[in-house]
Amino acid sequence: MVGNIVIVIINTSKTSISKILTITTIVFACLVYISCSSINKPENQSSQSYADHIARIAFVSDKDGNWDIWLINPDGSNLKNLTSNPSLDSHPSWSPDGQNITFYSDRDGNKNIYSMDQDGNNIKQLTLNSKSNHSPSWSPDGQKIAFVSNRSGENCIWIMNADGSEQYNLTKLLKSSRWPTWSHIKNEILFTSENVIYQINPETFELNTVFKLNKNLVFTGLFIGWPVWSPDGSKITLVSNFLDKEKMTPTLYTLNKDGKAFKPLINSPGLGPDERPSWSPDGNSIVYSSFTNNDKRQIWLISITTGFSTQLTSDDYMNGFPAWEPVGTTP
C-alpha cells in the first residue's frame, strides 16, 4: 500500500522550485507505475491458466463404504472424495474443458446419468428413466453426451444435450451396443456391438466398421470392449482376451484408427481383467484398473513410450473405472 506523500517547500527560489517539480514528477510517475502494476497483477502470483494445472484422474472407490467418485493426481497424491452417497456412483466422464463430470448413479432407485462440477458441487440429474442409463461420454464441443440405455428393450447408444434434453436412440438397429467414446477432435463415436468395434457420426448416422475379427478367429467367450480414442485420434486402445484363450483374461490392446496393427499394449503387472482404459491429455500414458494379489481392483498407469507401469492406488479397497481429465499437464 502506498501512503500519502507530502512535499514541503521551504526555499521558493526558481532553482529550488525547479528541483522540487522534477522530484515531484518522478515520484508521481513511480506512483502511477506502482498503481498500474497492482491493478494488472493477479491476486495470486502463482495462479496459472486452467490448462496448466496437473490433469487429474477421476475414479470409483468404496473407500468410505459406498461406491463414490474420487479424484487423484497421476503420481498418486491429492486424493479427494467428490460424492458421498449410500447409493452406487460410477463411470465418471470429464467434459472437454475439465469443468464438469458426468457419472451414473442409482440414488433415485434406477441407474440414471448425473452431472456435477469438477469439485463435486452442483449435482444435476440428466436422465429420468426407470431403465438402466450409464457409460456417459462427452462430445468434443461439450454440447452433447452419449450414453448407454436399455429403455428400448436392448442396450443402445443414446445421445442427449449436455443439460439432458432432446434424447434420442443412435444405434437402434444394432444389438448390445456398449461403451460409447466420443472422439476428442471429430464428431465421431466409437462403440462395440457383439465384439465388433464401430464408428458412427451422431448427426448423419453414418456407420463404419473399425475392427472385426475373422470368423475363424472368433471363439466362445471372446471379449472386445472399452474402445477409446487417443487424444490425437490416431490410435484406439481397448480391452480384449483375444490372445488369452486359456485364462480368458481381458488385457489392454491398441490398434490404429483404420483398425490395423492390432497388438497387445502391455503385459499388465496386474492380475486382470484390465478395464476402462483412459488416455492422458498428451497421449503418452494410459490409466486403467486391474486386480492385484490382495484380490482388490486397483488403479494403474502405463507409459506408452517407456512401457513402465505405476500402481496409483494400493489400499484394501476396490478402485476402478478411471477417467483422465482431458485438459492439463501430465508429470
Image (tube, rainbow, N blue to C red):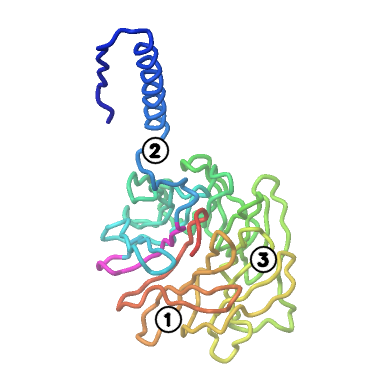
Residue beneath disc 1: 291
The one of 255 and 159 positioned closer to us in this rendering:
255
Q: How crowded is mark 2: few (under 14 residues within 10 Å), some or many (20 or more)?
A: few
Q: Which of marks 3 and 2 is nearer the N terminus?
A: 2
Q: In which quarter of the image is the N terminus?
A: top left
C-alpha span from label 3 to label 1: 25 Å
Circles 3 and 1, Cβ within 8 Å, touching? The answer is: no
Rendered view: 186 above or below 29: below
Q: Hey, what amino acid is under mark 1? A: Phe
Q: Does the magenta stretch include residue 169?
A: no
Horizontal relation, residue 297 to residue 329: left or right: left
Q: Which of marks 3 and 1 is nearer the N terminus?
A: 3
Magenta part mainly helix, strand or loop?
A: loop
Q: Residues within 10 Å of mark 3 (few under 14, many from 20)?
A: some
Residue beneath disc 3: 235
Residue beneath disc 2: 42
Q: Position of residue 298 (x, y in %)?
A: 40, 76
Q: What stretch is highlighted in magenta?
A: 54-66
Q: Hey, what amino acid is under mark 3? A: Lys
Q: Residue 182: which quarter of the image?
A: bottom right
